Image: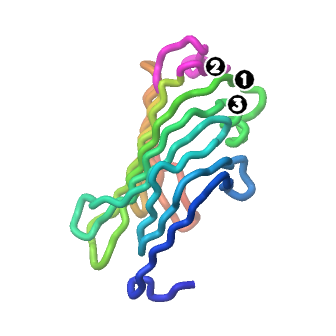
């Protein structure tokens, strides 16, 4: 391991050509990964990385941008793709008795704040996931049921800092939810919603 990282200059680029990446012990695996992953000091940088993930194509870009305060920088992830709903349901271990079919386009952006040097500002990170859910069939009771011909988008927004997180969900014109979580000594727990 590298000790005293702040005293070192690190610049590593890894070319990926037809590789795969996976999260151990899960159904999350990206195949035919193409692109370059670069680590420059404490920054992770990716431009135009492509892969196949959960039955569809995905593109990922990661950059470093100045954040909302002095000494704060954001690692910004922008990604879009098309995902098979049955493959996603299997990866999330959704019970088989819930019928799902179709594939959907999606877009994700996350801004993960990181401190550098002596920054003391509060760390607030955010993510936003959007999908029109066109062509997706979901066999749940109303108002969560959905036919492939239905019109209505899904948006999930999250915001978190050291010991608290908030998730906002909107689905079509029927559903809105706000959930709050707090970190305790035993891990994350549902706070209110």
Q: Is residue 160 above or below residue 157?
A: below
Distance of label 2 from label 1 (alpha carbons)? 8 Å
Q: Which sits earlier in the primary sequence, circle 2 or circle 1?
A: 1
Pick the front one: 105 or 180 = 105
Residue displayed at 70% across by 31% down: 86
Farthest residue to the top: give it: 149
User: What x and y, as percent, mark residue 169?
Assistant: 45, 34
User: What x and y, as percent, mark residue 41?
Assistant: 42, 75
User: What x and y, as percent, mark residue 139?
Assistant: 67, 20
Q: Secondary structure at mark 2?
A: strand
Q: Which numbered marker is on residue 117? A: none
Residue 166 visible at all: no
**Residue beneath label 2, please?**
137
The quadrant where residue 118 appears: bottom left
Residue displayed at 72% across by 23% down: 99
Q: Which sits earlier in the primary sequence, circle 2 or circle 3?
A: 3
Distance of label 2 from label 3 (alpha carbons)? 10 Å
**Colouring mode (rainbow / by chain / secondary structure / one colour):** rainbow
Q: Which numbered marker is on residue 86? A: 3
How many residues crowd mark 1 within 10 Å: few (<14), some (14–19), many (20+)? Answer: some
Residue displayed at 66% across by 39% down: 54
Mark 3 in CB contact with mark 1 (< 8 angstroms): no
In the displayed structure image, the side of residue 84 where residue 115 appears, left or right: left
Identify the magenta region: 134-153
User: What x and y, as percent, mark residue 134?
Assistant: 53, 20
How many residues crowd mark 2 within 10 Å: few (<14), some (14–19), many (20+)? Answer: some
């Amino acid at each position: 391991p590298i000790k005293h990282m702040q005293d070192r200059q690190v610049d590593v680029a890894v070319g990926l050509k037809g590789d795969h990446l996976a999260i151990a012990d899960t159904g999350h695996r990206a195949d035919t990964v193409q692109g370059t992953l670069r680590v420059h000091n404490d920054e992770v940088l990716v431009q135009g990385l492509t892969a196949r993930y959960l039955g569809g194509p995905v593109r990922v870009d990661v950059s470093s941008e100045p954040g909302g305060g002095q000494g704060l920088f954001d690692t910004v992830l922008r990604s879009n793709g098309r995902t098979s709903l049955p493959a996603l349901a299997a990866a999330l271990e959704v019970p088989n008795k819930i019928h799902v079919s179709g594939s959907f386009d999606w877009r994700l952006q996350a801004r993960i704040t990181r401190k550098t040097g002596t920054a003391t500002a509060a760390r607030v990170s955010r993510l936003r996931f959007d999908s029109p859910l066109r062509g997706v069939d979901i066999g749940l009771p109303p108002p969560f049921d959905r036919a492939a011909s239905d019109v209505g988008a899904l948006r999930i927004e999250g915001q978190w800092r050291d010991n608290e997180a908030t998730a906002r969900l909107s689905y079509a014109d029927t559903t809105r939810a706000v959930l709050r979580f707090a970190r305790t000594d035993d891990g994350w727990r549902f706070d209110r919603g």
